[in-house]
Amino acid sequence: MRDILTAVNAPLRAVEIMELKDNVYYADLLLGDGVRVSARPSDSIALALRVGAPIRCAEQILTDVGIVIPDEQEDEVEKFREFLEQVTPEDFAG
């Protein structure tokens, strides 16, 4: 798909996850000069990652199904990152 978009000079500008209905997500590809094409979200996200295009999601979807990570988990992740930066292979030698 990436090669097709390049061949027809219609770069992927963004992917927008637009709607969630009956547990099914719907997405649009934003191409070239404002052309919108409906596409499967999984394929759209994969394509966006390959070409470096932004992936956007409707605010209402994030409100409805988004998961808020509590600050405590962020603190634990940061502590683990600090540990990884300081640990050496010798620390694990028996």
Image: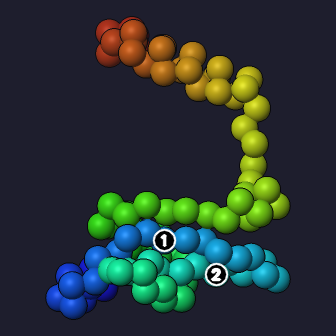
Rendering colour mode: rainbow
Residue 12: x %, y % from top left = 35, 75
For the residue marked with disc 1, what is the amino acid?
Answer: Val
Horizontally, is 87 left or right of 27 in the view? Answer: left
Residue under the point 54% across and 88% down: 38
Residue extending furthest toward the front: 33
Dot label at residue 26: 2
Mark 2 crowdedness (10 Å alpha carbons): few <14, some 14-19, many ≥20: some
Marks 1/2: CA–CA distance: 11 Å
Dot label at residue 15: 1
Q: Is any part of residue 16 visible from this angle?
A: yes
Horizontally, is 41 left or right of 66 in the view? Answer: left
Query: Is residue 66 positioned above or below 14 on the image?
Result: above
Residue 79: x %, y % from top left = 57, 16
Horizontally, is 15 left or right of 86 in the view? Answer: right
Residue under the point 48% across and 21% down: 81
Mark 1 crowdedness (10 Å alpha carbons): few <14, some 14-19, many ≥20: many
